[in-house]
Amino acid sequence: MYDTVNLWYDRVNIADRKPFAVLPHLSEITEKQSEKEGYCCYGKCLDYSVSCYETGISLKGSLAKSYFDGDNTGTMTRRATQNAVQKISDCLHLDLNKAQVVRFDVASIIPTKRPPTDYYRFLGEKPFFKRLQTNFETLYYNNHQKQIIFYDKRKEIKSVPEILKNENIFRYELRFLKRIKSQMKIEVTTKTLYDENFYMKVVKSWYDEFMSIQKINKHNIMINNITTVKEAENALFTYALQQLGQNTIDEFLDELKSKNTFKERQRYYELKKKLNDILTAPRGEKSDLILELERDIYNISKYAR
């Protein structure tokens, strides 16, 4: 389930306390002298960019791509994670198990019936996150510590695995971007990643974060009980807003804010709440697309080991 895993290996935990000892095992080495960081060297090891400083070693890259030779569509099980750490350790001639995890992503691909963008309009607001859809291709949920991202993996990979040749490839990533210890309640090292309890905890987080996103039901125009022109107007507005989806509300509010339409910021909140209440009204039924995602994400999390 892991993809990007960024590490910091403090000098005090490195054998002989010599961060630059890994240089003979790197490719594409460059060096730099700066007032802020002092002398440092940069190089490559598998998918990782490795930066060596007097104070320690920074590694930034994809655990999955390092293990699967450039491909991150495969699932990083606990065993694969342990083997990937060993593979990078062997490449660097350095035991990475004591390195501190400073960022990690939990991710999986989901073969879907429809293109990924067709699912976005049924994914609404999420508490404590800012929803952002870019060019209708990628959907983000951001806060200051984590990020959720949905996108079409097929458009990113150069060579689609044979098993996925005829599939739409929906990618869901949960990114733990900073303050890992605070979020996970423990000090997370590379070795922690393949601990069974920790692994199951992050898989559950991946599932729970998706489930906490508001799901927008599919609706039909409710005309049976309409008796006035105003009721007909409201019914059509409700249906149109639900067809357009969350992104339309977000763009409309952003436009109002850019023009300083309301003097009090509270007015934007009130309008957003009113429009979201219409959008997520309980009448209607859950979209088949959301049911498909919920089923597949549940199954992935249930059988992840």
Image (cartoon, rainbow, N blue to C red):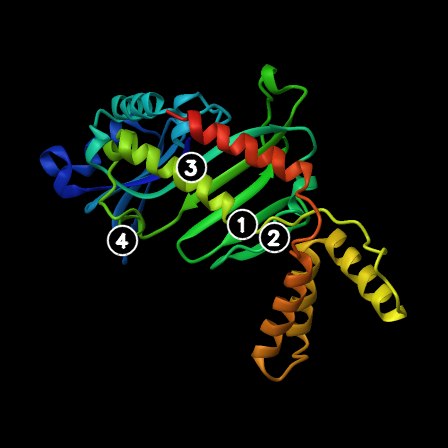
Query: In the rendered view, would you say 71 is above or below 212?
Result: above
Query: In the rendered view, would you say 141 is above or below 155?
Result: below
Numbered disc 1: secondary structure: loop
| Whole-percent x, y for residue 22 in the image | 23, 31
Mark 2–mark 4 CB contact (< 8 Å): no
Give the number of the mark in front: 1 or 4: 1
Instruction: Give the residue number, with chain letter if any, for mark 1.
Output: 213
Q: Residues within 10 Å of mark 3 (few under 14, many from 20)?
A: many
| Residue nearest the observer in this picture, 13 or 23 | 13
Sooner in the amino-acid sequence: mark 3 or mark 2: 3
Instruction: Give the residue number, with chain letter if any, for mark 4.
Output: 37
Q: Residues within 10 Å of mark 4 (few under 14, many from 20)?
A: few
- Indicate which disc residue 230 carries: none
User: How many angstroms separate mark 1 from mark 3 (CA)?
Assistant: 17 Å
Dot 4 amino acid type: Glu
| Whole-percent x, y for residue 294 in the image | 56, 36
Give the number of the mark in front: 1 or 3: 1
Sooner in the amino-acid sequence: mark 1 or mark 3: 3
Numbered disc 4: secondary structure: loop
Numbered disc 2: secondary structure: loop
Dot 1 amino acid type: Ile
Q: Tell me: 78 left or right of 95.
A: right
- Residue at 85% x, 56% y is 223
Mark 1–mark 2 CB contact (< 8 Å): yes
Instruction: Give the residue number, with chain letter if any, for mark 3.
Output: 106
Mark 1–mark 4 CB contact (< 8 Å): no
Sooner in the amino-acid sequence: mark 1 or mark 4: 4
Instruction: Give the residue number, with chain letter if any, for mark 2.
Output: 124
- Residue at 34% x, 33% y is 200
User: How many angstroms separate mark 1 from mark 2 (CA)?
Assistant: 6 Å
User: How many angstroms separate mark 2 from mark 4 (CA)?
Assistant: 43 Å
Sooner in the amino-acid sequence: mark 2 or mark 4: 4
